[in-house]
Image: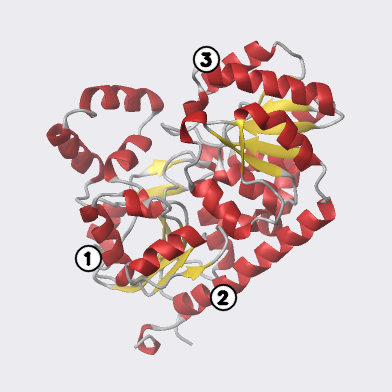
């Protein structure tokens, strides 16, 4: 019987972000193939926070570009990530700030720096085609997102559409991206985000994390329970933090639960520990604590053992969904009315009556409402989403496992 070809798992798991770091674990567990390569835009070792060690996709293209292999984009908002964003987000936060100050307004120098940093000329570098890997037997996009693709410049969008048109399989994680791609002639399948599988595949590992270290300390600190709260650095202006502090203090008083502040992503343009320190100081309460671990399994355990999740992270929501927990995404005052990926995903997969987002001024009331949701119903929904993803992944498995001569 012919052996499966090597499979290259590619995505944005070369930087710290909860969802992106979980995706390759889901794909690797579901593929019956020991010959896996893990690649991002840059070479990076994130094993210290529970991630993989990645190879640079440009270097792998030089080494393996003409070899028969499968390329599996493992998930994430890959279709709208521009090269400048991507190159900055794989830097350290300190380096990123200096680079942004130096190059943001200098287009020519910025483009040269990006090319040097990534060793790629692509405008949408987290999308890979046979142009980079001429020997690729199968190119797969699994549950990717592109909510703002219509807002991107035409040359960027054309590059993405061309790459998707040349792929062997494309699925997206919400209906907004699906409808957008259909307008450009791409018939993408619809499948939940891979993180719906975390409870089904990794519950034992996550439960072990809950019994030790910082998660166990939070459980001991809040014996009556806690709400897991997260917000990106975009919420860090004084007025917004003040309003969040007022709402969280109200939630503590009304629910009796504590609040644990955690980071879902530490890459540039993600979450900022200093914001949480200011937020905790504004609350001035023993009922709020900052969770400092960046290990993705600790973060999953923290969410899994919470009474509810509230925050700006889509994958904070999806991990809570996977464990059948109440959840709501926080909308930024400057972005109200915009249909971001959180709204698009909730509109596609959320149960009726569960809000997609909450404005800061309504945070306490909406979390209290979410806490009253029937947990049995949430658990059934979590299992249904995992089953839907698993069913769709059989299509991917069939593509990856089939010998080249059977692919036509």
- Residue 361, above or below 71: above
Q: Picture quarter containing residue 216?
A: top right
Residue at figure coordinates x 48%, y 27% from the top left: 233
Label 2 CA crowd tier, 10 Å (few <14, some 14–19, many 20+): few
3 or 2: tag closer to the N-terminus: 3
Q: Mark 1 points at which residue?
A: 131
CB under 8 Å between callouts 3 and 2?
no
Q: What residue does disc 3 label?
A: 238
In the image, is 325 to the left or to the right of 188? right
Q: Disc 2 to disc 1, how far (Cα)?
A: 27 Å
Outermost residue on the front side: it is: 337
Q: Name the residue under label 2.
A: 394
From the top left corner, tell me how far across and down residue 394 is, in percent: 56, 75
Q: Is residue 179 left or right of residue 304?
A: left
Residue 305 appears in the rendering: no
The image quadrant where one finds the C terminus is bottom left
Residue pictured at 66% horizontal, 46% vertical? 355
């Amino acid at each position: 019987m012919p052996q499966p070809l090597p499979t290259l798992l590619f995505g944005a798991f070369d930087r710290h972000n909860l969802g992106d770091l979980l995706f390759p674990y889901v794909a690797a567990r579901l593929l019956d193939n020991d010959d896996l390569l893990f690649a991002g835009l840059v070479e990076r070792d994130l094993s210290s926070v529970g991630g993989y060690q990645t190879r640079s996709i440009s270097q792998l293209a030089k080494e393996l570009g003409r070899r028969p292999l499968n390329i599996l984009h493992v998930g994430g908002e890959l279709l709208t990530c521009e090269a400048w964003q991507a190159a900055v987000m794989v830097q350290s936060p300190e380096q990123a700030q200096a680079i942004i100050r130096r190059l943001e307004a200098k287009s020519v120098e910025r483009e040269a720096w990006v090319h040097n940093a990534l060793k790629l000329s692509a405008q949408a570098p987290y999308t890979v085609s046979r142009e980079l890997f001429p020997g690729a037997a199968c190119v797969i996009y699994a549950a990717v997102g592109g909510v703002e693709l219509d807002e991107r410049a035409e040359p960027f969008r054309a590059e993405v559409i061309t790459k998707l048109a040349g792929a062997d399989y494309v699925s997206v994680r919400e209906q907004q991206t699906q409808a957008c791609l259909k307008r450009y002639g791409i018939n993408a399948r619809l499948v939940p985000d891979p993180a719906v599988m975390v409870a089904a595949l990794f519950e034992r590992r996550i439960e072990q994390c809950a019994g030790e270290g910082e998660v166990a300390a939070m459980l001991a600190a809040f014996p009556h329970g806690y709400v897991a709260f997260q917000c990106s650095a975009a919420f860090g202006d004084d007025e917004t933090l003040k309003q969040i502090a007022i709402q969280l203090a109200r939630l503590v008083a009304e629910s009796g639960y504590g609040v644990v502040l955690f980071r879902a992503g530490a890459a540039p343009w993600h979450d900022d520990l200093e914001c949480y320190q200011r937020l905790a100081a504004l609350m001035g309460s023993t009922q709020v604590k900052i969770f400092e671990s960046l290990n993705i399994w600790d973060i999953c355990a923290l969410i899994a053992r919470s009474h509810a999740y509230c925050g700006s992270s889509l994958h904070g929501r999806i991990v809570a969904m996977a464990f059948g927990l109440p959840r709501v995404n926080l909308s930024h005052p400057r972005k109200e009315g915009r249909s971001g990926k959180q709204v698009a995903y909730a509109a596609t997969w959320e149960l009726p009556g569960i809000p997609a987002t909450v404005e800061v001024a309504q945070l306490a009331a909406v979390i209290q409402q979410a806490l009253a949701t029937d947990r049995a119903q949430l658990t059934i929904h979590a299992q249904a989403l995992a089953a839907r993803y698993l069913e769709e992944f059989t299509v991917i498995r069939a593509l990856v496992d089939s010998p080249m001569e059977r692919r036509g």
